[in-house]
Amino acid sequence: QVQLVESGGGLVQPGGSLRLSCVASGSIFSSDAMAWYRQAPGNERELVASISAGITNYADSVKGRFTISRNNAKNTVYLQMNSLKSEDTAVYYCNTRFYWRPWGQGTQVTVSS
């Protein structure tokens, strides 16, 4: 059974940084494209960044500020978030890019002064 566990969120001031981690267990393979998503209150879940075979893609709203990476040996995907803005406030989730597995609990990111 697949399990996704996100961590690293918190409260940060505008302009600050956070690094999110996601540990995957079960039938997720190093060949699977992985992604970070986020959902703000009242909004639909949106794709933030993805990584597949070393190729990364980002939503326009985070391009240049966020960096996705993965360590296959540790079954872990990371999201380095810099220059955070209030509009980045959301619950962040990781999952495969396609054919989603069961969602984890996510990690709350709050950007506020």
Image: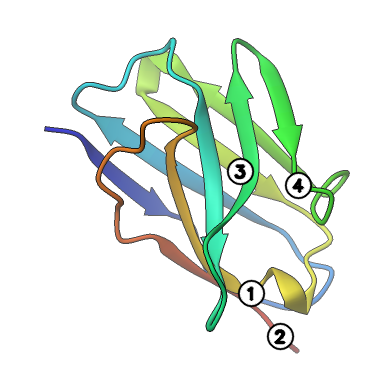
Q: Which mark is residue 101?
A: none
- Horizontal relation, residue 113 to residue 39: left or right: right
Which residue was labeled with disc 4?
A: 59
Which residue was labeled with disc 3?
A: 79
Badge 3 amino acid: Leu
Which residue was labeled with disc 2?
A: 112
Badge 2 amino acid: Ser
Which residue was labeled with disc 1?
A: 89
**Could you tell me residue 7's position as x and y percent?**
41, 54
Q: CA distance from mark 3 to mark 4?
A: 13 Å
Marks 2/1 in contact by CB < 8 Å: the verdict is yes
Which quarter of the rendered picture does the N terminus lie within?
top left
Give the farthest residue toward the right: 64
Dot placed on the residue nearer the N-terminal end, 1 or 3: 3
Dot placed on the residue nearer the N-terminal end, 2 or 3: 3
Q: CA distance from mark 1 to mark 3?
A: 14 Å
Badge 4 amino acid: Ala
Marks 2/3 in contact by CB < 8 Å: the verdict is no
**Could you tell me residue 101's position as x and y percent?**
29, 38
How many residues crowd around disc 3 within 10 Å: few (fewer than 14), some, or many (20 or more)? many
Dot placed on the residue nearer the N-terminal end, 2 or 1: 1
Q: CA distance from mark 2 to mark 3?
A: 19 Å
Marks 1/3 in contact by CB < 8 Å: the verdict is no
Give the farthest residue toward the bottom: 113
